[in-house]
Image (cartoon, rainbow, N blue to C red):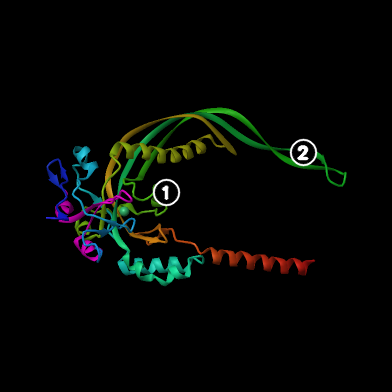
Amino acid sequence: MYGLWQMPMKHSGTDVAFCQQARVVLNCQHCDAQVSVSQIYFEQNRFAQRRDAVRCPLCDLPCEPCHIPNRAYETHGDKHSQLFRMLPFQVTRDAAFAHLQQWLRARWFVPHGFLQQRTWLHRCQSMYMPYWLYGCDTKTRYSGERGDDFYIDVTRTNSDGKSVTQPERRTSWRSVSGFVPTRCQDVLVPAAHVISTARLHQLEPWDLRLQVDDQADCLSVDVCVDFQVDMAAGYARAKERMQAEIEHAIRLDIGGDAQRIHHKETQYLDVIEQPLQLPVWVLAYQYQGKLFQVLINGQTGKVQGAHPYCWLKIASCVVASLAALGVMLSWLG
Ligand SMILES: [Zn+2]
């Protein structure tokens, strides 16, 4: 049968509960999204003129359902034997819509015509976004320099030809080395390429204490995104995120007013890694041939997104500002 199928995700002999639910699998040729959508989404987003195509929830373009299996699971099936844990949605569809409208109202330079076409706002979809969650202890040896500030009096000749003495800051540096242990917890790495990592990081923070393994949400959610980043690649990215925390610990350990880190070597111990699904509301829309996406944290309601700009509004604002500046200068003059 065309379209609806059961996702063939076997996990060391254990099927993930939500995968047993018949969902429509899309592999969008426009944005490379690999997602499964609910049957309700499928029926509501088919095109009237082209019934074999459904609107891609991540790029808003038509794509045909397909039957490809999930690459990450096939390649690394043994490592995914545990059930998904997930954060439940705490922002309802109505609340997400309200957050979206509030976000739009605060944006002055959105084109008027774009605001008039508000029907697309209702295409906001609930989505589970895959992540890898890491935690570990680290031990880092480092070498660098500690800088301590001091002040000296410096005499200079000013524009009036007079000598003026003022204190000026200098920094004395001395070599240091040391060892810092760090506990890195709740390091999140997005496990799909369909939305930029930077934008997903801007949805943080998440309260990860609220994890559940009840798959009910996954059964009813509009869109589930497949894992596209395997565990090894996720771990490499997690270590990059941990380095910021480690560097902060090193700077605290060095102390002083300024620090230079020349070398550091980190051991990662007792690494815990876990696949996790985070709740996101997503709205993707095409406007004048360009894709815009808005994301809403399904736990906190935080909005992150892009919108088109009306250059006429921006130009009017610049002209008005210059005119106001001109009036002020004429008063002062
Ligand atoms: Zn797409």
Q: Is residue 76 visible?
A: no
Residue occupying image coordinates x 58% and y 64%: 315
Is 200 inside the magenta-drawn segment? no
Res 297 → quadrant: bottom left
Q: Secondary structure at mark 1?
A: helix
Locate residue 26, reporting x and y percent. 24, 53
Q: Which element type, helix, strand or loop, lies under badge 2? A: strand
Asked if residue 54 shows in the view, the reply is yes
Q: Amino acid at mark 1?
A: Ala
Labels 2, 1: front one: 1
Query: Which residue is the extreme one toward the right?
Result: 161
The front one of 308 and 2 is 2
Residue 38 highlighted magenta (yes or no): yes
Badge 2: residue crowd in 10 Å (few <14, some 14–19, many ≥20): few
The residue range painted magenta reads 16-45
- Numbered mark located on residue 198 in the image: 1
Q: Is residue 37 above or below residue 249?
A: below
Q: Is residue 244 left or right of residue 76?
A: right
Badge 2 or badge 1: first in the primary sequence:
2
> Which quadrant of the figure contains the N terminus?
bottom left
Q: Residues within 10 Å of mark 1 (few under 14, many from 20)?
A: few
Q: Quadrant of the C terminus?
A: bottom right
Which of the labelled discs sits on residue 90, or is there none? none
Residues at marks 2 and 1, CA–CA distance in whole angstroms: 46 Å
Q: Which residue is mark 2?
A: 153
- Give residue 159's position: percent from left, percent from top: 84, 46
Residue 24 in picture, x, y percent from top left: 19, 56
Residue 18: percent from left, percent from top: 18, 54
Residues at circles 2 and 1 in contact by the CB criterion of under 8 Å:
no
Could you say which is closer to the camera, residue 1 or residue 137?
A: 1
The answer to which of 220 and 293 lies nearer the viewer is 293
